[in-house]
Image: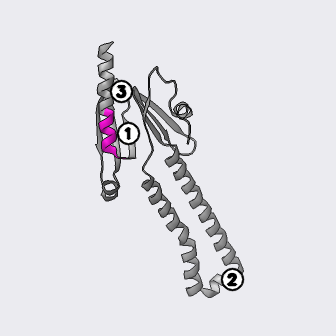
Amino acid sequence: MIAPRIRAALYLPHPAKGERIEFILRRHSLTLLVTTLGYLVLLIVPWVFRWFMEQNFTDFWRHPFFSEIIYLGGSVYVLFIVLFFFTSFIDYWLDVWVVTSERIIGMEQKGIFSRTFAEQRLDQLQDVSSEVQGFFPTVFHYGNVMAQAAGTQQNAVFKEVPHADMVARRIMELMEESRRKQQGK
């Protein structure tokens, strides 16, 4: 377990005095499981293809040139599947949204070599809503949370986070607290 001070330093750049972390959100782990299962199914394809070829085209399969080309193609295929899975895992693991008592910080991975970082103050937010669509999101309690800001600022979207409705409700409470602090100054 990471010590609270180190954890705050990892996820909270330039903390304001008295600012505390409310949530550190990631996508629901079921989304990674579904992606992993999809890639595992894709990894089975070369073995099914090999079995099919051995059953139906024995002479073609036993030819030294064609069998080596097929093995090479299968190896390249498996390598690309592993690469795409790794990219999906990196995207899952490095997408982090931090909700503090003062602001929302979004860190999202866009491909392997691109990352976006967005920050919005809670007192500038106008509306927060949650969206749960589909069978699995409903059953496993995950969805999207949208935080809309005033003006031309980009809206914050927390994708596929656990308990989206509770997160949206807590952000609304934090917005109200932040506005009360601003009015009290």
Image quarter hosting the N terminus:
top right
**Residue at mark 3 to residue at mark 1: CA–CA distance:** 14 Å
Q: Position of residue 107 (x, y in %)?
A: 48, 37
Q: What are the residue bounds of the magenta stretch?
A: 162-171
The residue type indicated by label 3 comes to Leu
Q: Indicate whether residue 170 is drawn in magenta.
A: yes
Q: Secondary structure at mark 3?
A: helix
**Residue carrying label 2:** 63
The residue type indicated by label 1 comes to Val
Query: Which is the main secondary structure of the residues drawn in magenta?
Result: helix
Q: Earlier in the sequence, mark 3 or mark 1?
A: 3
| Residue in the picture at 59% in, 59% down | 82
The residue type indicated by label 2 comes to His
**108 or 130, which lies in front?**
130
Q: Looking at the rendered structure, which numbered label has been put on residue 122? A: 3
Q: How busy is the neighbourhood of tag 1: few (under 14 within 10 Å), some, or many (20 plus)?
A: some
**Residue carrying label 1:** 157
Q: How busy is the neighbourhood of tag 3: few (under 14 within 10 Å), some, or many (20 plus)?
A: many
